Image (tube, rainbow, N blue to C red):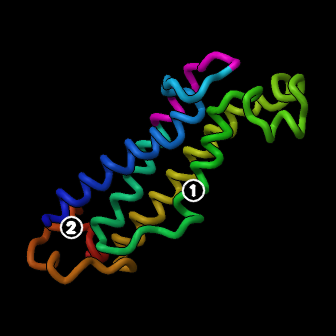
Amino acid sequence: MNPRYASAATSSISTWSTALVIGIPTDVLPNPWFGREICVRALDVIVLVALSAVTGALLATYAVAGAPAPGPRVRIGSGIIGWFAIGCPVCNKLVVTLLGVSGATSTFAPVQPVLGVAAVALATTALVIRVRAIRRGECPLPAGNHSSPTASGLRPDLRRGE
């Protein structure tokens, strides 16, 4: 399969999977299985879209480089923070257990935007580090990609430190 198509397919599947895995249980994406006591805020949707897009791009770099997918820590780190950031504070059993209902709305809800920014920043940092590693040649490209200068999906001057 052409690396560009593999990268695009991986990015698309990863983006939609992230959006569904985080968006359905938090009810940011309306569904019949989960509900929320507090309405979805605009920031919840923005964080979900941004986190999904960056995660899709990050996982696409593994298709470009022909490397195995990242370990569980890399895959779910920003996702867990993002889930806490966009979830209903009153519906989150862990938060309610630790802070109570009034603490969830008065203490945890105001912190959620910061968690959202942190989740997107963590995923973006991982993407930047990964792209830099590919450009430096620390993540070797599969042998079949060397015949075409743009087969890897990167500009020729950016591949392998050229």
Q: Is residue 42 magenta?
A: yes
Element under disc 2: loop
Q: Is the N terminus in the top left, top right, bottom left or bottom right quadrant?
A: bottom left
Q: Nearer the viewer, residue 87 or 151?
A: 87
Query: Which amino acid does the dot numbered 1 rest on?
Result: Ile
Q: What segment carries the magenta color?
A: 37-49
Residue reaching furthest to the front: 33
Residue 39 position, x and y percent, is 63, 16
| Number of dots carrying numbers | 2
Q: Residue at left 25%, top 53%?
A: 9
**Residue at (13%, 71%) from the top-left corner?**
149
Query: Where 139 sits versus 6, above or below?
Result: below
- At a point 29% along the width and 77% down the height, the residue shown is 160
Closer to the chain start, of discs 1 and 2, is 1
The prevailing secondary structure element of the residues shown in magenta is helix
Q: Is residue 74 above or below residue 17?
A: below
- Say the numbered circle drawn on residue 152: 2
Where is residue 44? Give x, y as percent: 57, 28
* Depth check, front residue: 47 or 23: 23
Horizontal side, residue 47 vs residue 130: left or right: right
Q: Amino acid at mark 2?
A: Ser
- Disc nearest the viewer among 1 and 2: 1
**Residue in view at x 23 percent, y 79 percent:** 142
Query: Residue under circle 1?
Result: 76
> Which element type, helix, strand or loop, lies under badge 1?
helix
Q: Between 85 and 146, which is closer to the camera in this rendering? A: 85
Name, please, the residue furthest toward the top. Answer: 39
